[in-house]
């Protein structure tokens, strides 16, 4: 179990990037930190993996503080960074092979991992020639090289085409099935909804809500109506929550005054819940 | 230890795939060509000269020919000599007129001339006059050698220690910094930090890489310029310790910068400071205490002593001891710096 208690972090002592953040990740759970860019997701992850020091609060792994953990702690975690940080002059295979040698535990076969993330064809090509998506996949594969118990994935699907993203999602699901604990930071509500058992909404460094995606929608979500209409020759759209009196009036007013093209009734999305709780969108 | 070798292989691949590394090997080849074929073994202190003897008995001309001066350097008229010097066929002309009892010498130069050269020519003329007057020439001074007199070092070979020291400084100090900037820019330092490998493996791997590179580079230069009759044990010890010292200095300086542009003024300053002892090496009268405090000073003279023994063999062991001590101190400083500024939580901007 990973326990994060009252975590706060400031880069400049004027404002906090993370403010009093607390949550618990159970073993074998996929936990998502969902929030827009600059919300404090990566800072939280970096404190949890020891890249940033603890300023306030604590992070406990099975009851042991990260402050007390030895270098062997890194044998049990795998980290995928948002920015692909790879040795450009080395091939994909060499990147995994030499990285594997830095751990004290049994590691996975680099070629098998490369095949798994769809990079076997370019395994012996230098990374400098890889596309952003290929680099992202290699960083993801590297996070799994030491067969870690806990996996930290920072925006693992960013920059990937839908097809590649889909098999990376499959690998994450496999890891969950294998009993691994996953912390996933994302600003993509669909990713969070599809992969996470628990989602924490994070905004301006603070946790706005934590629960399963379903519970969050049930608790905070409202059914809504999306209206697409034309105004001055341009297509526009609005979302109305009919339980809200003002929204109801605005909806009726729009129907009367505008040239309506399409009306959708829809259930709440995580983004709508996020907007409702924080007053801002995810992108 | 396993991690150090893995890292060493990784660092080795990263380095040999860097064009800068190979350009340094080309520098080694250029150095060999310069030492073996371009720089002369001996340099004339007095410029090449033309002579005209206007005396009635042509005493100077006879003396010069007997001394081995080529007849083509003895010109038939004063005007022709001046014209030849003007054209630049020679740097200096010497005109002798009058007689042995009442000699008149004229020096002809087309360019500027140093006072040292004028004094050397003056001394040579005085000696020449005394000999022609059949006087016994007695030196007014004696030379007493405190050590066994060593063989004169050919000028071209005397430059080898300079090339060796420059290489050690550049390879160790500059390349390790460049490597560190590349790792910072690629973000691979962050990836490294989430592995159980720590500061010691990081520093050891880089130190070993540049130590081996320096030995290969130095070994190639020595082999192709001096052959195999060299005390390679002492030589490799000096190169290894110097390389280690400069790599550790490079690691420590590199942690304060994120790219080469920020590093450049400071890095170049340190490189220049380390080349100042070359002035003392070429001109030993310039050896103030602050120059002697620069590590490359003793390395230069030690390499020379190893290659061309001048009887100062007792000089090498203290230099090795001093380098070992400097390496230990610098290792502790670099270890602390790399740990605090690169490896510890929050030490490097993530």
Image: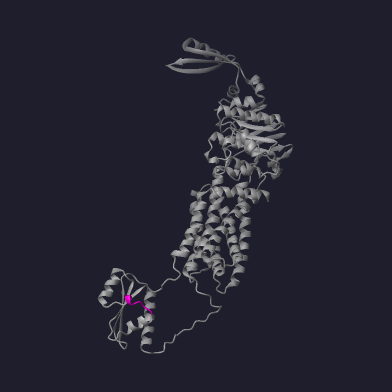
Which of these two is toward me, A245 or B202? Answer: B202
Which of these two is toward me, A249 or B162? Answer: B162
**Residue B324 in sight from this viewpoint:** yes
- Count of numbered marks: 0
Residue B213 location in percent, x, y?
Answer: 57, 56
Image position of A162 with respect to A94: above or below:
above
Which of these two is toward me, B31 or A192? Answer: B31
Left or right: B236, with B81 as reference point: right
Q: Who's the residue at 50% across and 74% down the image?
A: B152
Q: Quadrant of residue A271?
A: top right
Which of these two is toward me, A101 or B339? Answer: A101
Residue closest to the far top? A256
Q: Is residue B274 magenta?
A: no
Which image quarter holds the C terminus of chain B?
A: top right
Residue B106 location in percent, x, y?
Answer: 30, 79
Scheme of colours in the image: one colour
Left or right: A214, with B31 as reference point: right
Residue B39 location in percent, x, y?
Answer: 44, 66
**Residue A16 in sight from this viewpoint:** no
Residue B247 location in percent, x, y?
Answer: 57, 55
Left or right: B47, with B300 as reference point: left
The segment highlighted magenta reads B68-73
Left or right: A173, with B41 as reference point: right
Image position of A7 with respect to B282: above or below:
above
Q: Who's the residue at 38% across and 90% down the image?
A: B134
């Amino acid at each position: 179990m990973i326990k994060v208690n009252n975590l706060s972090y400031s880069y400049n002592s004027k404002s906090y990037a993370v403010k009093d953040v607390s949550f618990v990740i159970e073993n074998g759970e996929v936990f998502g930190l969902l929030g827009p860019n600059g919300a404090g997701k990566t800072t939280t992850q970096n404190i949890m993996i020891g890249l940033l020091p603890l300023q306030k609060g604590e992070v406990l792994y099975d009851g042991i503080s990260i402050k007390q953990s030895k270098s062997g702690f890194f044998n049990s975690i795998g980290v995928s960074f948002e920015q692909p940080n790879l040795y450009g002059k080395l091939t994909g295979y060499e990147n995994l092979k030499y990285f594997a040698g830095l751990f004290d535990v049994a590691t996975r076969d680099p070629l098998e991992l490369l095949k798994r993330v769809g990079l076997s064809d370019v395994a012996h090509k230098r990374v400098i020639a890889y596309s952003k998506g290929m680099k992202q996949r290699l960083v993801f594969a590297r996070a799994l090289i030491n067969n870690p118990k806990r996996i930290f994935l920072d925006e693992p699907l960013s920059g990937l085409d839908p097809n590649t993203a889909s098999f990376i999602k499959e690998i994450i699901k496999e890891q969950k099935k294998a009993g691994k604990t996953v912390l996933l930071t994302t600003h993509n509500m669909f990713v969070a909804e599809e992969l996470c058992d628990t989602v924490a909404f994070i905004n301006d460094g603070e946790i706005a809500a934590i629960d399963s995606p379903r519970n969050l929608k049930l608790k905070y979500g409202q059914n809504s109506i999306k209206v697409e209409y034309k105004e001055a020759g341009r297509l526009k759209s609005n979302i109305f929550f009919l339980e809200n009196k003002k929204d109801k009036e605005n909806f009726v007013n729009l129907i009367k005054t505008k040239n309506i093209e399409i009306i959708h009734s829809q259930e709440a999305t995580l983004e709508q819940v996020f907007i409702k709780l924080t007053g801002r969108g995810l992108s | 230890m396993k991690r150090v070798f893995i890292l060493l292989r990784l660092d080795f691949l990263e380095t040999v795939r860097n064009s800068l590394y190979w350009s340094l090997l080309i520098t080694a080849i250029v150095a060999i060509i310069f030492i073996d074929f371009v720089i002369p073994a001996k340099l004339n202190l007095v410029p090449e000269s033309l002579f005209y003897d206007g005396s009635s008995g042509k005493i100077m001309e006879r003396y010069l020919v007997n001394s081995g001066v080529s007849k083509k350097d003895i010109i038939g008229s004063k005007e022709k000599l001046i014209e030849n010097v003007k054209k630049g066929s020679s740097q200096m002309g010497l005109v002798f007129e009058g007689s042995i009892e009442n000699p008149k010498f004229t020096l002809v130069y087309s360019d500027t001339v140093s006072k040292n050269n004028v004094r050397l020519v003056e001394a040579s003329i005085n000696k020449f006059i005394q000999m022609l007057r059949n006087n016994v020439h007695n030196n007014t001074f004696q030379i007493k050698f405190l050590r066994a007199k060593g063989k004169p070092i050919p000028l071209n070979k005397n430059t080898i220690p300079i090339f060796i020291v420059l290489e050690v400084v550049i390879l160790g100090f500059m390349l390790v910094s460049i490597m560190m900037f590349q790792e910072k820019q690629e973000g691979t330092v962050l990836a490294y930090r989430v592995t159980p490998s720590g500061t010691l493996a990081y520093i050891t791997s880089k130190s070993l890489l540049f130590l081996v590179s320096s030995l290969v580079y130095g070994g190639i230069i020595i082999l192709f310029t001096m052959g195999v009759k060299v005390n390679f044990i002492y030589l490799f010890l000096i190169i290894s310790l110097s390389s280690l010292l400069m790599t550790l200095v490079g690691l420590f300086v590199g942690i304060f910068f994120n790219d080469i542009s920020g590093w450049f003024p400071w890095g170049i300053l340190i490189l220049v400071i380390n080349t100042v002892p070359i002035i003392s090496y070429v001109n030993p009268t310039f050896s103030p205490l602050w120059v002697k405090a620069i590590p490359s000073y003793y390395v230069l003279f030690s390499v020379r002593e190893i290659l061309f023994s001048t009887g100062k063999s007792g000089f090498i062991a203290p230099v090795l001891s001093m380098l070992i001590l400097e390496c230990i101190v610098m290792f502790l400083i670099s270890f602390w710096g790399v740990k605090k500024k690169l490896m510890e939580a929050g030490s490097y901007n993530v």
